[in-house]
Amino acid sequence: MRRVSFIVMFSFVLSFGYALRAAEAPSPEYVKAMKTLGAVVGGLSKPGASEDFEAVKKASAEAKAAFAVTENFWKAKGDAEALKLAEAGSKYSADLGVVANLTSSEGVEAAVKDIASTCKPCHDGHREKAAEGFVIK
């Protein structure tokens, strides 16, 4: 009887541990990176923003740094799908810098759309609303 009780209790504790681990609050660095990326996409999506190439170059550097944090976060978690999206975002951020150097407003607009295209699939698949903010699934 003790053995059965122990096995049941151990299984419960293990399941509870996985549930807690599955929905954890993101690190402050990760939250800051997400806010930076939101600000970059939001700022560069405004009318006329694609023609301020100095601001675009700065935004490109900020986005690259934020995606580096994001890549490290998902690499540490071992989530290949999220890591692939973060790596794509890094590439698109580098592309943003290239088109800014070429003074191509159309290129800037395309690169911003590419960056933004990585947001929704990652958010849909890897975050959920919590009582205070979001947690990582």
Image (tube, rainbow, N blue to C red):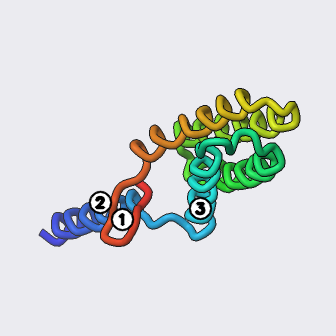
Callout 3: 10 Å neighbours few (<14), some, many (20+)? some
Give the camera-side residue of 75 and 136.
Answer: 136
Front residue of 50 and 1: 50
Distance from disc 1 to disc 2, alpha carbons, whole Å, reads: 9 Å
Left or right, 32 with reference to 55? left
Kindly identify the residue that appears in the image at 71 percent across and 34 percent down: 108
Element at label 3: helix
Secondary structure category for the residue under label 1: helix
Residues at marks 2 and 3, CA–CA distance in whole angstroms: 26 Å
Q: Is residue 19 above or below residue 41?
A: below
Residue 14 position in % (x across, y down): 33, 62
Sequence-wise first label, 2 or 3: 2
Q: How many marks?
A: 3
Q: Which residue is mark 1?
A: 20
Q: Is residue 4 above or below residue 96?
A: below
| Mark 3 vs 1, N-terminal side | 1
Q: Is residue 73 above or below residue 111?
A: below
**Residue at image coords 65%, 29%:** 110
Identify the image quadrant of residue 49.
top right
Label of residue 15 in the image = 2
Residue 76 visible at all: no
Amino acid type of the residue tagged 3 in the rendering:
Tyr
Instruction: Name the residue nearer the viewer: 114 or 84.
Output: 114
